[in-house]
Image (cartoon, grey):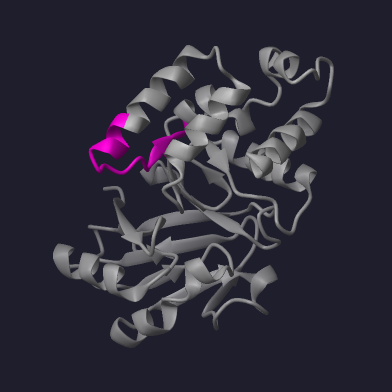
Amino acid sequence: MVLQIVPVPCLTDNYAWLAHDPASGATAAIDAPEAAPILQALKDHGWTLSHVLLSHHHWDHVDGLPALLKAAPARVIGAAADTHRLPPLDQAVQQGDSVQIGTQTGQVLDVSGHTIGHVAYHFPDSGVVFTADSLMALGCGRVFEGSMAQMYASLGKLAALPPETRVCSGHEYTQANAKFALTIDPDNPSLISRAEAVSAARAAGRQTVPSILAEELATNPFLRAGDPAIKALLGMTGAQPVDVFAEIRGRKDRF
């Protein structure tokens, strides 16, 4: 049996996620932007919260935690490197550590860049990774605290996961990301097709996450900094991929 995954829209464009292990009944919330939608999703599915996995300290990922825990006490897990900025943790984790949600074991990945201490949680037996504001659908998080090289290396860890992995990211930014991606990779037929599908989904009020890693590898410009066509379009033929990534990220910041 694998984790049952439910996206929970929060705030204006955030997602929390519920990950339920049917074999044990354990249920984790990944991030807590606000409590009410998470509590309602738990009620709708008849699940009892057992864990909260925090990705990073930004307010729109943790501010709902006190109210959530008041209504549904749970074990809180987050990055050891971020303990000074996170709510109190029951378990502090770092790269290479494991987390247990019932019968399902997740691996902790340090994906610093957006923030120092940002972590992702990969559950290989369930084919899912919770990436929050590191790798996003057709994008990546703005580099607030880390270096461009650090963010590029973090994305490389995620890109190396099995291509069928579902990518559960933290925001509904896909349509805006698609518009930018087309300025970087305009002749990519897979991207053109995906952008059209994303626009149709949003027009119909549908969510665009999770995405599939193989789809990100084919269409997400932040994972394609080594592509010769992208280098040529940017006037960076022969440049190192990390430098191309930095150029793409800088352009997105100004987009």
Q: How many marks?
A: 0
Q: Nearer the viewer, residue 71 or 247?
A: 247
Q: Is residue 95 visible?
A: yes
**Picture quadrant of residue 255:** top right
Judged left or right of residue 122, residue 19 is left
Question: Which residues are the magenta region?
Answer: 200-213
Query: Can you say whether 185 is above or below 244 in the image?
Result: above
Query: Can you say whether 8 is above or below 222 in the image?
Result: below
Taking the spot 50% from the left edge, 31% from the top edge, the residue there is 179
**Picture quadrant of residue 14:** bottom left
Judged left or right of residue 70, residue 75 is right
Q: Is residue 162 visible?
A: no
Q: Nearer the viewer, residue 31 or 233?
A: 233
Taking the spot 64% from the left edge, 50% from the top edge, the residue there is 142
Residue 33 in percent (x, y) is at 42, 68
Judged left or right of residue 24, residue 136 is right
Judged left or right of residue 74, residue 94 is right
Q: Is residue 209 magenta?
A: yes
Query: Can you say whether 140 is above or below 84 in the image?
Result: above
Residue 185 in percent (x, y) is at 59, 20
Residue at far front of view: 255
Q: Is residue 54 magenta?
A: no
Taking the spot 67% from the left edge, 60% from the top edge, the residue there is 115
Taking the spot 27% from the left edge, 37% from the top edge, the residue there is 203
Residue 60 in percent (x, y) is at 49, 67
Residue 229 in percent (x, y) is at 67, 12
